[in-house]
Amino acid sequence: MEDKIDLNRLCVHTQTTKPWDLHTCIKEYHKVGIPHLSIWRHLLENQDLKLVKKALEDHQLKVTSLVRGGFFPSVSKSVRKEAIQENKKAIDEAKAIGAPLVVLVCGADPKQSLETSRSQIQEGIQNLLPYAKEANVRLAIEPLHPMYAGDKSAIVTLEQANDMAELIDDPFIGIAIDVYHLWWDNQLQKQIERCGKHNNIFAFHVCDWLSPTTDMLTDRGLMGEGSIPVREIRKWTEKAGFQGPIEVEIFSERLWGINQEDYLKQIKQAYIEHT
Ligand code: ZN
């Protein structure tokens, strides 16, 4: 029976089932025994967050993280200031729905060097940390694949994320390891060990890399469909001490186009067989 399959650590990002609104995600995930979810912020717009929290509790769903804050760098000082305000709003929302973590897509401004963007990211996080601590919400730097270095993240390797987290050195700042962004790196195993040693593995995201990838954003694969050794990387995180939820985060026009209830079954299967 389905119930006997161990889904204890399975988490699904709401963006994975993008055609569904928040309350459909909550209802449908619960129906198939998924115990965790990560919520994308746009789904909280115009929602009563108390009711969201209650709906999550009623369906025994735990929120792993709120996605996403960040986007700190800019050549404009006022834009950098606005980013801090926006991140505080994200922290407020996380607190209101009971999410212990906000994932940071750190940002980059193509009009300046990556080094400058990285120092603005560090400054942004340091400005934000007291607010995050007050709210008891942790922050996770998510290094992105280098193809996004132009405008989405000046942090593109786990080594860079480790460097920054260790420099900031605070129990409220850590790292979200996403196999899609990091699988190609021959330093990955070593950097995961390092990340664990500093208690900085805050989250673990999975999907697969398709060849050819036909879209930089929305052509991710289901685990087992591509070339990422997801299970091996998962083992590295566990060896490094990580025991948290395993978050299925897939952006795919192809998979958004199929029946989403069938898709959830495929996700469970891929989780069991390939993750
Ligand atoms: Zn991710």
Image (spheres, grey):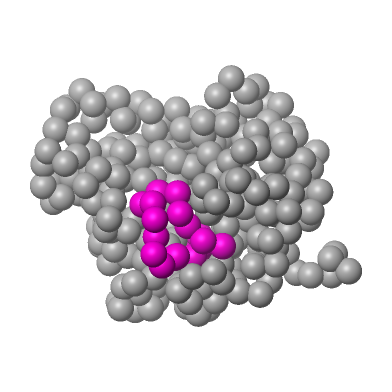
Q: Position of residue 23 (x, y in %)?
A: 71, 34
Q: Toward the viewer: 12 or 118?
A: 12
Q: Residue at x 45, y 41 (%)?
A: 68
Q: Is residue 10 left or right of residue 71?
A: right
- Measuring 35% from the left and 26% from the top, which residue is drawn there? 85
Query: Residue at the right extreme?
Result: 1
Position above or below: 37 against 191? above
Residue name at image x 68 percent, y 31 percent: 52
Residue 115 picture location, percent across and down: 13, 51
| Residue 218 image position (x, y, % from top left) | 45, 49
Q: Quadrant of residue 17?
A: top right
93, above or below 190, in the image: above
Query: Is any part of residue 82 visible from this angle?
Result: yes
The N terminus, quarter of image: bottom right
Main secondary-structure element of the magenta-colored stretch: loop
- Horizontal and vertical percent for residue 182? 36, 66
Residue at 30% in and 77% down: 187
| Quadrant for the C terminus in the image | bottom right
**Residue 202 magenta-highlighted:** yes
Which is more toward the observer, 72 or 228?
228
Along the horizontal axis of the image, is 249 left or right of 259?
left
Residue span colored magenta: 201-222
Q: Tell how many labels.
A: 0
Q: Quadrant of residue 76?
A: top left
Inspect the magenta stretch and tell me whether residue 252 lies in it: no
Q: Quadrant of residue 34?
A: bottom right
Can residue 171 be seen here? no
